[in-house]
């Protein structure tokens, strides 16, 4: 995660996908032998002057490495932080909670969207896919929610399909989309014929 010149290869944090970025930042510190700098105080045996000085130097390295992997917009939003511990606390306070709130709002939107809100199945699927992409930005494991919401929001005329697919152990989003487009196409042909 670092190059010969000391440049960090940790992707810049731009205010999105915080949990993933934070995990990568902690792995970066661990790989570079700096993870102990996240402890509130130097280790007890580091009270000896030389060890305490080494701890401060390593803590400064950790702080600079992580700061270099944060966009200027995010840095400006954090206010004054001058050490690694305060930096991680500030990031968690500002972005950790926001991600949880954002996830809640997106889940509500996802499960309150119904196919009857749209005049075509394709538009409904596009909306669920769009909300799902936003949700996956804050929760990488959101795929199952998206498939369930897609089925949950179907009109009553799709109840037989929804009941049949709901019993499956794993839901394949792409297959569900394909099935729904096929079913909707059949409905449209029936409407045109009558």
Image: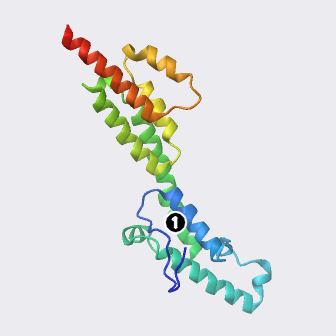
Residue 186, picture quadrant: top left
Q: From the viewer's perspective, tell me whether residue 163 is left or right of residue 190.
A: right
- Residue farthest toward the top in the current orientation of the protein: 194
- Identify the residue at image location x=65%, y=71%: 30
The percent coordinates of residue 85 (x first, y second) are 59, 72
Front residue of 166/17: it is 166
Which quarter of the figure has residue 133?
top left
Q: Quadrant of residue 22?
A: bottom right
In this image, 126 relative to 54: left or right? left
Q: In this view, does 69 lie above or below 150?
A: below
The percent coordinates of residue 115 (x first, y second) are 33, 25
Q: Along the line of sight, which residue is nearer the eye, 32 or 46?
A: 32
Badge 1 element: helix
Q: Is residue 83 above or below residue 184?
A: below
Q: How many marks?
A: 1
Q: Residue 64 at x, y = what percent? A: 52, 80
- Residue at the far bottom: name it: 50
Q: Name the residue under label 1.
A: 90
Q: Nearer the viewer, residue 15 or 47?
A: 15
- Against 4, residue 143 (above or below) is above
**x, y percentage for residue 33?**
66, 77
From the image, which quarter does the N terminus lie in? bottom right
Disc 1 crowd rating (10 Å Cα; few below 14, some 14-19, many 20+) is some
The residue at the point 50 percent across, 48 percent down is 139
Task: Locate the C terminus by quadrant.
Answer: top left
Residue under the image location 46 percent in, 20 percent down: 162
Taking the spot 76% from the left edge, 83% from the top edge, the residue there is 46
Q: Is residue 104 above or below residue 115?
A: below
């Amino acid at each position: 995660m670092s190059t010969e010149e000391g440049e960090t290869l940790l992707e810049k944090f731009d205010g999105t996908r915080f949990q993933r970025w934070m995990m990568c930042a902690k792995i970066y510190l661990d790989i570079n032998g700096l993870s102990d700098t996240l402890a509130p105080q130097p280790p007890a045996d580091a009270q000896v002057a030389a060890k305490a000085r080494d701890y401060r130097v390593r803590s400064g390295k950790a702080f600079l490495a992580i700061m270099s992997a944060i966009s200027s917009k995010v840095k400006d939003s954090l206010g004054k932080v001058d050490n690694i511990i305060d930096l991680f606390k500030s990031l968690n306070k500002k972005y950790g909670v926001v991600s949880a709130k954002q996830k809640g709002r997106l889940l509500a939107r996802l499960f309150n969207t119904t196919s009857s809100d749209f005049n075509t199945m394709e538009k409904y699927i596009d909306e669920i896919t769009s909300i799902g992409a936003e949700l996956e930005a804050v929760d990488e494991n959101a795929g199952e929610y998206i498939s369930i919401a897609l089925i949950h929001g179907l009109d009553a005329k799709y109840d037989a399909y929804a009941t049949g697919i709901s019993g499956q152990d794993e839901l394949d989003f792409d297959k569900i989309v394909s099935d729904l487009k096929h079913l909707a196409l059949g409905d449209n042909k029936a409407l045109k014929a009558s």
